[in-house]
Image (cartoon, grey):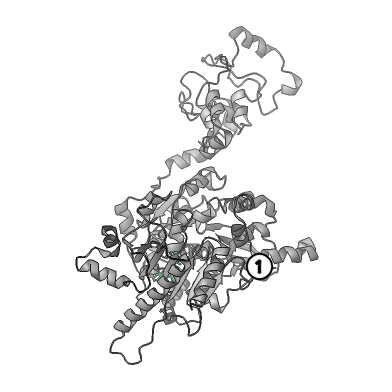
Amino acid sequence: MLRIQRLLPAPLLAARGLATSAVVGAYTPRTSFGVKPGFASHERAAARDRPAPAGDRPSRDRPASTRPAGDRSKGPRRAPSGRPSWAERSAGATPKTTSQRLAAFPRGRGARDGRGEDKRDGGKPRTQAQREKPQWRADGRGGFMPAKRAAEAAAAPKVKPEYQQKANVELARPRKFASFGLHPGLLTALEERFGAKGETMPIQSLALSRLIDSELTRTNGINSHAVRAILGAETGSGKTLAYLLPLVHHLKQDDRVPSRAPGPVAPRAIVLQPTHELTRQSTAVAKGITHQAKLTVVGASSPGAVKDAGEVDVLFATGRTAAYLLGIPREETDTREKDESRDKKKEDKEIWEREEVEKRRRRPENDKPRIDLSRVEWVVIDEADVLLGPDFLPETAAVLAKLRAATVGLNILLVTATLPPSILRAIETDPLLSASEFTKLLSPGLHKLPKALETRFVPWSGAGNPLADVAHEIKRGFAEEAQEAKVEAYGIDNAPKSRTMAVVFAGSVSKVNSTVAKLEEKGIPCLAWTGESDSRVPGYNGAALDSFLVSHKRSKDPASESPAGAAKGAPRVLVTTSLLSRGLDFSPAVTTSYLIEPPRNVLDFVHRAGRTGRAGRPGRVVVFGMSHAGQSKYASELRDVLGKVESRPAVKPGGRSWSGAREARSRGGRGGQDKRKKA
Ligand SMILES: Nc1ncnc2c1ncn2[C@@H]1O[C@H](COP(=O)(O)OP(=O)(O)OP(=O)(O)O)[C@@H](O)[C@H]1O
């Protein structure tokens, strides 16, 4: 074991959840010379009679000899001093009482079964001290839990960690919202939003059937042991309501009228998200469904919204904002600055936080907005693949540590479009997340692009500035869509002309700026949106960005969600970075995502591509300069997430249109790409 400990660096041991105590406890501890750290029998007898040195004298509730009189069973005795043994000390989680030590390191040959259980007498207390004190069992994670709770946990029906595909499909069947026993206020709001015929989307069926009134919520008990679940489904599949509906339903079950007294914002549920833009949009969705249920929802996308907000039901905040409100110094959470490019640094700067820092310099410390975690019952980590990924983990972990210190029995939901190893690692290693097992509620489409999304890989033409290719491609895309709209509206007088929109994703702020310059030079008005944009101000998006997003404002007619298209003269193209790729619900009028630089990894690819083709609507993603069959470092993962793929000929002004290429294929031709190869 010593050798294992030496070979594996401590962080790795921790990362693997390989708690040293659990491993050490499974073996009879030996010194490095292979000698058991016990006493020879004559030494034992002498040691029993000898008074322990003053510093080592056992305390009143820690008897010197833990073996009852007359017990002649074999096996190493404990040191009479009552001090923790070498194995206990090296285990980190040092048992404090004799009974804890006995539970972790039972005596006698055959006593250990690898989990610290004493098999000889079924783990029954054998001494008076043991009988009077709570019994402890190793919890398998390097710590201890009361034996009674361990027995209850063992007896409780086990929740299947992951559904079989077949069961999943059945549970994920779309159903009426009313069939899940949701709070009546929620049902009214859902009917207003989706109409009387509205039905759940698959991940919502899965979440509602498992999180409203089920084995999971009953046996684990909302208020006894926490509900822990991962909701995983592809982008645009309705995950926002999948977590919000169970959350609001449970908050209403135990309805508490919040005090109106001003004070630090004190939420019952916190939803952590990666960006302010997403926070604003999700706050609007939550307000839209809770106006009947009468819950207080606030979004911390501006300091004014949370200042002296007092008791609220749901708080939406970015991880960084939550860290700021909790008074965690920026330096503790910001590891990015060291590793990443200047552009990335700039992109990630949160404007209102900077302004806050400025303001704080000018006003007393206790005047800044603060957060009170004592009422928190639920935590949702939305976009968990991003927030628990390397870029955001420091601030997320810092917030989770504060939550762990301030609350007991938290219900935790992780919501994600992909399930990368970083999430599983965080679940194993984070002290709060690793405290109990997560039930995985995963849709079969997890880690795949939405089915309705068409993917096209377009090589550069190689002629001149590549951004000219992008401009050409965008114009051609718009022209084609206008043509299709015309055909659809054929015969209808004054049919509205479709003014579809597009979003272009670049890898850096400077690339965004150069792209906008080139597109505008080519006659395509654009909106640039990065962390550095002047238009990105605290508290609101502004009309220009809002025109690209689904509006969740309640006053709006649901019909307004139909793809109205861009207003005349308004920009039809949004050029941005990953900032707007995470979770934002883009308007159905945004039909195409252009990826003009290879995303850093497959996770970024999925998030950027997933801004179109949402909620089952058709959409397109056009990827420049890379191929699904290529040698990129994540090519094989990419092939996994892609559905149908169409390769395109190099972009040539005046070349054949996409539909032309499609027609050629349907006539039996093989498309421009292959013809090029033949040539
Ligand atoms: N039951 C439903 N019926 C019809 N539309 C729905 C339903 N539930 C959600 N939607 C719509 O689906 C769209 C996508 O939902 P949402 O933004 O929650 O997706 P998501 O899975 O969170 O996406 P992402 O992974 O990008 O964050 C929204 O416009 C939402 O209004």
Considering only vertical position in the picture, is 144 above or below 41?
below
Does mark 1's beta carbon lie closer than 8 Å to ligand 1? no
- Furthest-top residue in this view: 42
Seen from the viewer's position, the closer of residues 174 and 592 is 592
Q: Residue at x 57, y 64 (%)?
A: 510
Which quadrant of the structure image shows residue 316? bottom right
Residue 202, x across and y down, in percent:
36, 62
Q: Quick check: 271 left or right of 648?
A: right
Residue 436, x across and y down, in percent:
50, 45
Count of numbered badges drawn on the protein: 1
Seen from the viewer's position, the closer of residues 423 and 579 is 579
- Furthest-bottom residue in this view: 493
Q: Residue at x 51, y 14 (%)?
A: 74
Name the residue beneath numbered marker 1: 306
Residue 667, x across and y down, in percent:
19, 69
Helix, strand, or loop for circle 1?
A: helix
What's the residue type where badge 1 is placed? Val
Is residue 200 shown to the viewer in this render? no
| Mark 1 crowdedness (10 Å alpha carbons): few <14, some 14-19, many ≥20 | many
Ligand 1 placement by image quarter: bottom left
Seen from the viewer's position, the closer of residues 394 and 503 is 503
Q: Quick check: 132 left or right of 363?
A: left
The image quadrant where one finds the C terminus is bottom left
Is residue 343 shown to the viewer in this render? yes
- Furthest-left residue in this view: 668
Seen from the viewer's position, the closer of residues 568 and 52 is 568
Residue 607, x across and y down, in percent:
46, 60
